[in-house]
Image: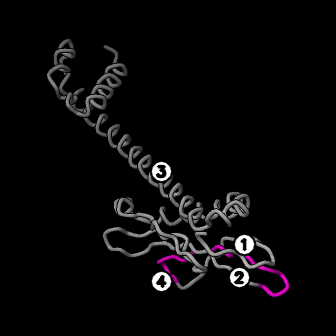
């Protein structure tokens, strides 16, 4: 059997059987009997298979973090629209989707990239945005420690002679949530906007 075909076959079988049939399994010894130094080949195959499995596991953990990130982003958008309610949401949805939310995505990705992959499994998003004129849209927090990692807020600002604006911003744990990181603004009108969640 050609060497490259043998390597591919051994690696594929080991990965597909999730390690049940390993490169040192007796099935390979029967296939390789014609070669006198098949034990040497098996040890080389074993190390190649381990390298391949490690690469597959790394790809799997990257895929898991991407799925987690997509899940967080989906919930973030749901929580934002829940906060906007049926009166505010339809009027600001285009600007929010095209201008503000891509910046929220960027901030979430930046934060998740700085978090340890093992710790990422403990992150969740809050499920109750605040109503009235409070700022909280949603927070991403560590479930085990109950500590926030990043907080997303929207503030209603009344500017004399200009009208009302929604100021979107976030705070991070890196500076104990003291700084405002601006995400952008959306103009409402000169009329007083309705309360959140309405």
Q: What's the distance in space between the residues labelled 1 and 4, CA to CA?
A: 24 Å
Q: Residues within 10 Å of mark 4 (few under 14, many from 20)?
A: few
Whether pointer 3 and pointer 1 mark residues with C-beta atoms closer than 8 Å, the reply is: no
**Number of marks drawn:** 4
| Label 2: which secondary element | strand
**Left or right: where does residue 173 sit relative to residue 101?**
left
Whether pointer 3 and pointer 4 mark residues with C-beta atoms closer than 8 Å, the reply is: no
Q: Which residue is mark 4?
A: 176
Whether pointer 2 and pointer 1 mark residues with C-beta atoms closer than 8 Å, the reply is: yes
Q: What's the distance in space between the residues labelled 2 and 1, CA to CA?
A: 10 Å
Q: Which mark sits nearer the N-terminus, 2 or 3?
A: 3
- Residue in view at x 27 percent, y 37 percent: 47
Q: What's the distance in space between the residues labelled 3 and 4, CA to CA?
A: 27 Å
**Part of the protein shown in magenta:** 159-177
Q: Colour scheme of this structure image?
A: one colour
Q: Residues within 10 Å of mark 2 (few under 14, many from 20)?
A: some
- Residue in view at x 35 percent, y 74 percent: 146
63 or 95: nearer the eye?
Answer: 95
Q: Quadrant of residue 155?
A: bottom right
Q: Which residue is mark 3?
A: 66
Q: Which residue is mark 2?
A: 157
Q: Position of residue 119 (x, y in %)?
A: 35, 64
Q: Which residue is mark 1?
A: 185
Q: Which mark sits nearer the N-terminus, 2 or 4?
A: 2
């Amino acid at each position: 059997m050609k060497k490259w075909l043998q390597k591919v076959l051994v690696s594929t079988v080991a990965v597909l059987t999730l390690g049940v049939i390993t490169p040192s399994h007796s099935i390979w010894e029967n296939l390789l009997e014609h070669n006198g130094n098949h034990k040497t080949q098996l040890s080389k195959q074993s190390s190649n298979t381990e390298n391949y499995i490690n690469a597959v596991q790394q790809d799997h953990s990257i895929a898991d973090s991407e799925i987690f990130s997509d899940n967080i982003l989906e919930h973030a958008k749901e929580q934002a629209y829940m906060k906007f309610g049926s009166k505010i949401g339809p009027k600001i949805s285009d600007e929010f989707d095209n201008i503000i939310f891509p910046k929220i995505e960027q901030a979430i990705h930046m934060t998740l990239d700085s978090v340890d992959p093992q710790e990422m499994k403990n992150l969740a998003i809050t499920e109750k945005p605040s109503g009235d004129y409070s700022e909280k849209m949603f927070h991403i927090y560590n479930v085990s420690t109950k500590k926030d990692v990043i907080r997303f807020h929207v503030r209603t600002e009344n500017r004399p002679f200009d009208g009302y604006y929604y100021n979107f911003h976030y705070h991070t744990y890196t500076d104990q949530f003291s700084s405002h990181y601006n995400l952008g603004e959306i103009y409402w009108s000169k009329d007083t906007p309705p309360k959140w969640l309405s």
